[in-house]
């Protein structure tokens, strides 16, 4: 197993990070580790609804996705439609420091991502968020 794929399996290290390798390298490592990779291009996204829609498309949320913060938290913590996986990778490409959101919405989004990492850690599955 390549070193990046091994690192992805490190439950305690899982969290949110700036991507320190190429997207293709991350994609290959995620595949080798049996982790679905949700690739969200956030370039030019402005506002809560647009961010939620971009994340829903990237992760392939079910059609009944409610497009609100609670639904985002629920769907990130129930990835059953992905099939059995050893862990998960969320790649946020071209994201600005503000996520294209108001300060309040940005804080909510960051809290949801952090809570998702903890949720999956408690279930012995790494959940990674990479910013590229």
Image (tube, rainbow, N blue to C red):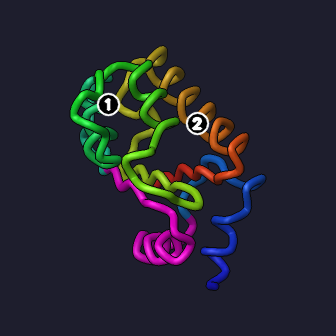
Picture layout, residue 26 above or below residue 46? below
- Residue at 40% of width from left, 53% of height from top? 82
- Residue at 58% of width from left, 36% of height from top? 116
Of 72 and 96, nearer the camera is 72
Of 4 and 103, nearer the camera is 4
Q: Quadrant location of residue 42? A: top left
Picture layout, residue 52 above or below residue 35? above
Percent from the top left, x then y, of residue 27? 43, 71
- Disc 1 secondary structure class: helix
* Residue carrying label 1: 52
Of 18 and 127, nearer the camera is 127
Looking at the rendered structure, which numbered label has been put on residue 116?
A: 2
Q: Is residue 5 left or right of residue 58?
A: right
Q: Is residue 111 magenta?
A: no
How far separated are the C-alphas under marks 1 and 2? Answer: 15 Å
Foreground tag (1 vs 2): 2
Look at the image and give the residue range highlighted in magenta. Answer: 20-40
């Amino acid at each position: 197993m390549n070193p990046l794929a091994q690192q992805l399996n490190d439950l305690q290290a899982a969290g949110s990070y700036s991507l320190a390798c190429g997207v293709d390298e991350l994609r290959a490592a995620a595949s080798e580790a049996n982790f679905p990779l949700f690739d969200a291009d956030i370039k030019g996204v402005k506002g809560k609804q647009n961010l939620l829609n971009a994340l829903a498309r990237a992760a392939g949320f079910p059609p009944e996705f409610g497009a609100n913060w609670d639904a985002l938290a629920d769907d990130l913590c129930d990835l059953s439609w992905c099939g059995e996986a050893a862990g998960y990778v969320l790649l946020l490409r071209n994201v600005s420091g503000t996520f294209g959101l108001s300060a309040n919405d940005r804080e909510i989004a960051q809290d949801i991502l952090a809570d998702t990492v903890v949720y999956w850690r408690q279930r012995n599955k790494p959940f990674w968020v990479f910013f590229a």
